[in-house]
Image: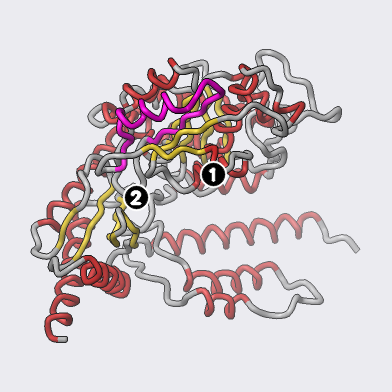
Amino acid sequence: MAEPSEHRDSATRALLMEAARRAADYRDGDAVRGRPSMGYGEAVEAFEGELPVEGEEAQAVLDALVRAAEPGLHPATGPRFFGWVIGNSHPMGVAADWLASAWGQNTANHVAAPAAAAAETVAARWLLELLALPAQCSVGFVTGATMANFVGLAAARGEVLRRAGWDVAAHGLFGAPCVRVLIGADAHSTVPSVLGHLGFGRESIVRVPTDTQGAICPEAFERALAESGEGPLIVATQAGQLNTGAFDPHDVLVPMAQARGAWVHVDGAFGLWARACPSRAGLAHGVELADSWASDGHKWLQTPFDSGYAIVRDGEAHRRAMTIAASYLPPVREAERDPSHLVPELSRRARGFATWALLRHFGRDGMAAMVERHCALARRLADRLAAEPGIAVLNEVVLNQILVRFGDGAGVEADDAATLATIAAIQADGTCFAGGAKWRGRWAMRVSVIGYSTTEEDIDRSARAMIAAWRSVASAAAQG
């Protein structure tokens, strides 16, 4: 017998209200939450069990989910989480994302989800305005910068081959003209990965030497261009090196590459947001000259995860690379923007709602102030750490990234060991979270200041904890 509609409605409301209460309770603890109390193995045990034969009551399942999950969650929404370049999932974005899930819209096209498609249309225009990119660009809402790089480089592949007389959509890559790709030696690992998915083997990719901060050297780039031959060429640059925050010199590189006929794609996962801040926009000078760009919403815009933007100057090249067509899908009139023509997915969540809500919530001034504040906080933390004997800041802190190395200079291996031990001590303490990364063959601690809730007090408290961890490691080594 069917469940009465009034009972279903009551149960649905109770479940959603309880989920909202649990979420609010969790976020109430953001400022005090430390490291996860269980690791992966224990988390598997917490979720483990036989597949139920009969389904469980919804409230009981919700209780079980919270009990199993929360002890294994990192404090990524807290003010002292510096482990990766990820924002705090701002409550405004979370609220909009909740509604997106509740509304259950498949943003495949503008007919299936008119409001979702419209939110993307307006949010895309606002993004271009905020980032000072050409107004005619098309924008695809994807899962993150990895897929944004995929979309931009797919458009690049199709267009440079089209210019060479080859239709990659019709003929694939077998027998196609050879496409060369230039990337910086310190490009993010997702860029060569994406290029591999697009059919570019390692021998097609030339890694151009970089300077001490990881930015492409113009002289080396000029030589690489001269050695690239006359065929189709793609250049992938970087706005915000993952470890140092450095920017490739786009005002020099882009004109050089385009004079050679190259398509220039910019991996701007977090650094592209510098253009929203007048005091930092100069770091990305010349970026607007490129042909495509990739960025993340779940970095400086603070959206919940599953939010990225593939931006392409040539909308036709973008659509040629991504359009999904079928007889059952609605036709698109000239004035309409169809989401499925700009991303590699047909079925997907309505990502535009959270982006639209956060852009409206922060506004132009709010975004500029947040980027400026995070950069100042990064400088503050770097200065406090660098003042302590045995702690070295390895990068020029031009944005929000800090590379820190610990040791007494006894040698690379000894300082590597001291750095890794200090990182472990910081993580065990739980005051803040930061992780390790290799830079120029040496281990360092990487700190990313990008959470909307981080304050000067959080920075000072974190600095004290980091210094205390280093002193403890150094003392143990001296006694040992």
Identify the residue at image location x=56%, y=22%: 231
Q: Report the front residue among 233 and 265.
A: 233
**Disc 2, SS:** loop
- On whether residue 219 falls in the magenta region, the answer is yes
- Which image quadrant is residue 47 in? bottom right
The image position of residue 191, as x and y in percent, is: 49, 42
| Image quadrant where one finds the N terminus | bottom right
Q: Which residues are magenta?
A: 214-238
Amino acid under disc 2 = Gly
> Which residue extends farthest bottom?
480
The residue pinned by badge 2 equals 451
Does any portion of residue 393 appear in the rendered image?
yes
- On whether residue 390 falls in the magenta region, the answer is no
Q: Report the front residue among 148 and 351.
A: 148
The image position of residue 32, as x and y in percent, is: 32, 66
The residue pinned by badge 1 equals 202
Does any portion of residue 366 appear in the rendered image?
no
Reply above or below: 185 against 131: below
**Disc 1, SS:** helix
Of mark 1 and mark 2, the one earlier in the sequence is 1
